[in-house]
Structure formats: structure tokens, C-alpha cells
Image: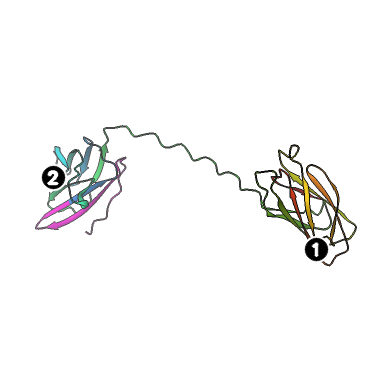
Amino acid sequence: SHLEPPKFDCKLEPELKVLNEFAGNMALQVRLQVWQTGAVFDLDFGSPVVISETWGVDLVDVAEDEETVFGRFRLHPEASHVPIDRRSSFGFSVTPPLIKMPKMMCKPVLPFPPPPPPSPPIPPPNPPPYLAMDETDCFLGGQAVFTVKPAKLPGRTWSVLVSLQRWSPGVQLTIDFIGEQLRQHPLRIVQMMPLSAVKEVTVTSHSAVIELLPSPVRQFSMVATGAVESLGRLS
């Protein structure tokens, strides 16, 4: 149809459209997102019309003066055995055909539930799987990353790979780890690789001090156990 579908301020969310126009008669359909039996719809057609062939509603009142015609419709119980294109809808015909779409107001008969509560805030992102070295802590620069993440079972081994931007033999590097259960399940180093590049100096329940040896490589890995949850600091 040449008539644009209008927008209505109605909680039942009606959509009004022209089905067809034939021999001076125009058929209209109102599809609802929410169906409430007994709800009332007031339509202002803007000019005198004759309303006929209602379905899904009763025409319960009309009012007319020289300029305006109002039609009041009341919804039937929603019909289930109707064609798909007529479900959740009601309709009627008007004569003569409309030159503009009517205005519509509705009066629901049931209260609407309160709006849902706002969504919970988005949790902060997980910390990165690596720890970048702050050069104020250590001039070597670099990062540490878990290559095998710590498991919830403290006896399982995990591994961390440390890559340095600069390699300076004789420098001692401290790797701090974080874990609430480290006192009960302290850090234990199982293996350092390559052995020609690094040497274990001291180990506490939550940290390891590693000495760099003369080596062409700039990274090493450490296999360990302990209730570690994340990397803390490189210094």
C-alpha cells in the first residue's frame, strides 16, 4: 500500500498494515506482540468511515462528528485455529479507503511485569597469561609466560618460559609467584632448561632466584610444582 505503517505508543506493540483495497473497501490488520483478552483499542480515522467485517475483536463503540470518526475495539480471546498470517492479530474493513493511517491508542487490561533488573557489570578481564618485566625493576627487560598453566592440584608440574631482551651473565633474576596456598604447598623447582644458561640460587615458598650464565640464548624455562595461581613480579 501507499500508506506508511505508523508507530504507536502502546505497550501491546501493535503493527497496523493494509491487507488489500478493492471496490472502495480497504481491509486492515493489526498484529500484536502482546495479546490481552479484553484490551481496548481506540482508532481515530480522521474522516468518516463505515467499519465492517471485524475479526479477532468486537466493535463496541463508534463516535462521529463532522471531522472525526473514532472506533473502539475490544480483543477476543486469542484464536489458535487461524491461518499463520492472522495469528496474534485482529482486523476490519473500512469504506471509503483511507488516505492516511489512523491514530491508535490502547488500554491494556493486565499489568505489565516490571522491567528486568540491569545486567550485572561485566567482570574485569582476566590478567594476561604473561608478565611483562618493568624496566624499573630490572634493566634486562622481557617477559615471563606459563607454557603449562598451574593446575588446581598442587602436586602437578607446570612450567614458565622467561624471555629477556638483554642477557647479562652473573645477574641474578628474582621471579615472584602469587598463590593463596603457597605456604601449604610451596614452590619447588623440578628442572631448569637449558642447564648451560641458568643456575638456581635460592628458592622460597613463593619465589626463585636464578643466576644467568654465559649463553648465546636469551630465554630459559623452569618446570616446578606448588600452588601457584599467577605470576607476580620479575626483578
Residue sitting at 16 percent across and 57 percent down? 20
Mark 2 to mark 1 CA distance (whole Å): 84 Å
Decide if residue 164 is in sight here. no
Q: Find numbered disc 1 in the image and state the secondary structure of the residue it sits on.
A: loop
The residue sitting at 27% across, 53% down in the picture is 5
Q: Is residue 144 left or right of residue 4?
A: right
Residue 111: horizontal and vertical position, in percent?
Answer: 32, 32
- Count the marks: 2
Answer whether residue 19 is magenta in the image. yes
Q: Residue furthest left?
A: 23
Q: Is residue 66 visible?
A: yes
Q: Quadrant of residue 44?
A: top left
* 202 relative to 139, above or below: above
- In the rendered view of the protein, which quadrant contains the N terminus? bottom left
The question of residue 18 being in magenta is answered with: yes
Q: Considering depth in this image, is 22 or 176 the residue closer to the camera?
A: 176
Residue neighbourhood size for the residue with mark 2, other residues' Cα within 10 Å, grouped as few (<14), some (14–19), many (≥20):
some
Residues drawn in magenta: 1-27
Q: Amino acid at mark 1?
A: Arg
Which residue is painted at 41% across and 37% down in the image?
115
Q: Is residue 46 left or right of residue 194?
A: left
Label 1 CA crowd tier, 10 Å (few <14, some 14–19, many 20+): some
Residue 227, horizontal then vertical, whole percent = 71, 43
Judged from the image, the secondary structure of the residue bearing numbered disc 2 is: strand
Q: Residue furthest right?
A: 170
Residue identified by numbered label 2: 54
Is residue 173 found left or right of 41 in the rendered image?
right
Residue 127 location in percent, x, y? 66, 49
Q: State which tag comes first along the sequence, 2 or 1.
A: 2
Q: What amino acid does circle 2 point to? A: Thr
Name the residue at 67% across, 53% down.
129
Residue bearing mark 1 = 218
